[in-house]
Image: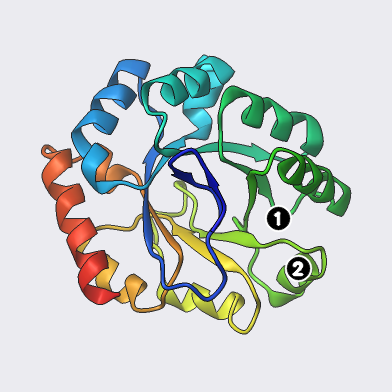
Amino acid sequence: MQVLGKRKLLIDKGENILLLQLALDRLTKKECVQLINETYNYIDLIEIGTSVIKEYGMSIIREVRELYPDKMIVADMKTCDAGGYEAEQAFKAGADITTVMAFSSNATIMDAKKIAQQYNRRLMVDLLEVSTGERIKELAELGVELVCLHVGIDKQQASKFNSELFSLVNHLNFDVSVAGGIHLESLSEIVLRKPNIVIVGSAITGNSNPQEITKKMKQIMKNEC
C-alpha cells in the first residue's frame, strides 16, 4: 500500500479492506467541521460533497486538509469536462481522491487519470446513471481502477442503493465504492458484497446522534468482514 504521511492513498488489489467514507453535502462549513469532529474516530475518508465545493470552492478542501492531516479527503468534483484541470485543482487543494463522471468523454477521464498519477493520488469514476456493462467495460479498458456504484439523491426517493448493482462490476478488476441512501439497516447486505469503500451521507449527517450511528456502522463493517 502506498502511503503519504499517515494517509492511505491506494487500496491494494485483493486486500480485504473496507473503509467508511463520510459524505458531507448540503451543509455549511461549520456543520461539516462539527460532523467530522463527532465521527472522526470511526471514519476513514472525508468526502467534501459537490454542493459544498460549489458553495465554498477549493478553500473548503484546503481548510479540511489543514484541520485533519491524517484523514483521506475525497473531493466530489463530479467532473464532466476539463478533466486534467479540475483534477489538479482538487489535488493542489489537498484531496487524495477526486471524482469524474463515467459518462464523460474518454479524453476527460484519461486527462484526469494522468494528473492523478502525477500527484500520486487517486481517481474515482462515478457510475451515476450508467446502467449497462458496455460503458463499464470501456472504463476497464481505459485503465480505470476505482469506480463508484451510485444511486443519486433525486432517485433515492424511489429506491435506495440495491446490492444488485454489483452485477455491473462483477469479474472486472475494479476497486469499488458504493453510495446512495445507505443506512444502518441496509449496511450488512452491502458489506457482504465486499466493496472497498462504503459512502454514507444523510444517514449520518441527518441523524440526531452522528457519533453513535457512525460507531454502529463501523462495527457492522468490522463484524461482516
In the rendered image, which quarter contains the C terminus? bottom left
Camera-nearest residue between 204 and 158? 204
Looking at the rendered structure, the kind of residue marked 2 is Arg
**Residue at image coords 82%, 45%:** 108
Q: How many labels does the image show?
A: 2
Q: In this view, does 94 lie above or below 12?
A: above
| Residue 18 visible here | yes
What SS does tag 1 mark?
Answer: loop
Answer left or right for 117 relative to 54.
Answer: right
Answer left or right for 104 relative to 169.
Answer: right
**Residue at image coords 56%, 66%:** 175
Residue found at the very far right of the displayed protein: 107
Please report whichever mark, 1 or 2, sits nearer to the chain's N-terminal start.
Answer: 1
Q: Label 2 near label 1: C-beta < 8 Å?
A: yes
Mark 1 vs mark 2, CA separation in Å: 8 Å
What SS does tag 2 mark?
Answer: helix
Q: Position of residue 20 (x, y in %)?
A: 35, 53
Q: Position of residue 125 (x, y in %)?
A: 65, 54
Answer left or right for 39 relative to 93.
Answer: left
| Residue 82 visible here | no
Looking at the rendered structure, the kind of residue marked 1 is Ala
Q: Which mark is residue 135?
A: 2
Q: Residues within 10 Å of mark 2 (few under 14, many from 20)?
A: some
Q: Position of residue 206 (x, y in %)?
A: 23, 38
Answer left or right for 71 relative to 141.
Answer: left
Q: Residue 102 carries which label?
A: 1
Camera-nearest residue between 140 and 52? 140
**Residue at image coords 56%, 28%:** 94
Q: Residues within 10 Å of mark 1 (few under 14, many from 20)?
A: many
